[in-house]
Image: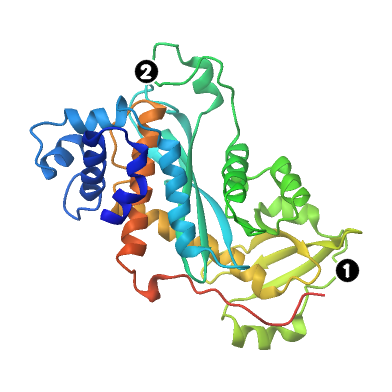
């Protein structure tokens, strides 16, 4: 943990919060501890929970600056020259009442139903070197922004405006690009996490992507008579033996004068009643394994988020404000990154990313 302490020490002007933030992350990684402020304080041999609560609520430190340190730390261990993949993903946190920031009656991705919850958006980065979560945003539903009062303790400025989930994902992706990632893939595992504005922005920046489609949207994109056959049927046996044992099909949709090409990728996972559809875009030389790697990265980052939730206390917090949420989630992500990289996670936990086979024509 001393490596992490040195990484973020300059974000704290006083020794007390600098010491306490390390104790907080050590408590988050404790396998048996319930991650309440009182339990974390007891684990740190403090007399009461006031210090831990103050760390999340009123202590002077910038969670966004520590988030930047988190991103740099994860990318240091996962960045490679050409095979990075960014995956935006979301998690819902069931809550009681309506006073905490962003809590509203909304769709829960965790339980796949409507319930009273907060929605957190996260950005993961994965490559053959490893994987980790590098950013976070708290989603503010439109109805919550309309109903809240200036005195509700959420810590939002009065002129804050509504931003879609796709807009928040674009913000996180842009931050990653600003900090040294060069033309990574973007792989979006849920249709609710992207929109046409995000897709056009990715096109304008020449970033290749794989975006999950709803079945109705996939049908609308396909040629009317489906005259074009699914690509590379003749190579399917060779592809299956070298890449995976699951059926994948590609349908070429169109190519722009610049050479940027669009495909529809269909994946028929075992045990699923319906295939999964993805809108993919990239250079005309894009290979099928690149599509598959991009889609597989989604489950790798989901596993990473689940491990953070279970093993680093991501979902165990007692804060109402945006500041408190940002601080807790940032420290939770940083604690999990430390466990993943500083403690040398076994290679078997890293995602399997297939690489080279014939190109899509």
Task: Identify the mark nearer the N-term, 2 or 1.
Answer: 2
The residue shown at (7%, 33%) is: 47
How packed is label 2: few (under 14 Cα within 10 Å), some, or many (20 or more)?
some
Given residues 54 and 32, the one toward you in this image is: 54
Using the rendered view, name the quadrant where residue 348 is placed.
bottom left
Residue lying at 69% horizontally and 44% vertically, measured from the top left: 198
Residue at (61, 78) in percent of width and height: 355
In the image, residue 326 sits, relative to residue 187, either above or below, namely above
Structural crowding at the residue carrying mark 1, measured as other residues with C-alpha within 10 Å and reported as few (<14), some (14–19) or many (≥20): few
Residue named by callout 2: 153
Q: Which percent across, then down, holds residue 115? A: 42, 34
The residue singled out by tag 1 in the image is 227
SS under mark 1: loop
Q: Is residue 1 visible?
A: no
Q: Position of residue 121 (x, y in %)?
A: 49, 42
Which x, y percent locates residue 30? 20, 53
Q: Is residue 66 visible?
A: yes
191 vs 76: above or below: above
């Amino acid at each position: 943990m001393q490596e992490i302490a040195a990484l973020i020490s300059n974000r704290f002007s006083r020794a007390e919060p600098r010491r306490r933030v390390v104790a907080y992350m050590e408590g988050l990684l404790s396998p048996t501890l319930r991650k309440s402020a009182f339990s974390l304080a007891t684990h740190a041999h403090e007399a009461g929970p006031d210090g831990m609560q103050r760390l999340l609520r009123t202590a002077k430190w910038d969670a966004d600056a520590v988030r930047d340190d988190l991103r740099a730390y994860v990318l240091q261990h996962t960045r490679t020259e050409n095979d990075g993949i960014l995956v935006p993903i979301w998690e819902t946190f069931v809550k009681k009442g309506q006073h905490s920031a962003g809590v509203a009656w909304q769709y829960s991705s965790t339980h796949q139903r409507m319930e009273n919850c907060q929605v957190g958006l996260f950005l993961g980065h994965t490559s053959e070197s490893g994987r980790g979560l590098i950013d976070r945003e708290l989603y503010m539903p439109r109805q919550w922004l309309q109903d809240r009062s200036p005195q509700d303790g959420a810590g939002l400025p009065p002129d804050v405006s509504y931003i879609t989930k796709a807009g928040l994902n674009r913000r996180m992706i842009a931050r990653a690009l600003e900090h040294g990632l060069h033309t990574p893939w973007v792989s979006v595992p849920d249709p609710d996490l992207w929109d046409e504005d995000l897709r056009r922005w990715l096109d304008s920046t020449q970033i290749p992507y794989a975006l999950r489609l709803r079945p109705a949207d996939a049908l609308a994109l396909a040629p009317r008579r489906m005259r074009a056959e699914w690509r590379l049927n003749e190579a399917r046996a060779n592809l299956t033996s070298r890449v995976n044992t699951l059926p994948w099909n590609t349908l070429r949709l169109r190519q722009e004068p610049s050479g940027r090409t669009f495909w529809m990728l269909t994946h028929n996972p075992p045990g699923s009643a319906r295939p999964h559809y993805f809108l993919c875009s990239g250079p005309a030389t894009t290979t099928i394994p690149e599509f598959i790697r991009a889609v597989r990265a989604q489950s790798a980052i989901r596993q990473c988020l689940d491990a953070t939730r279970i093993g680093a206390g991501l979902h165990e917090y007692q804060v109402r404000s945006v500041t408190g949420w940002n601080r807790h989630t940032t420290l939770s992500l940083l604690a999990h990154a430390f466990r993943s990289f500083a403690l040398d996670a076994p290679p078997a936990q890293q995602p399997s990313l297939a690489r080279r086979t014939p190109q899509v024509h």
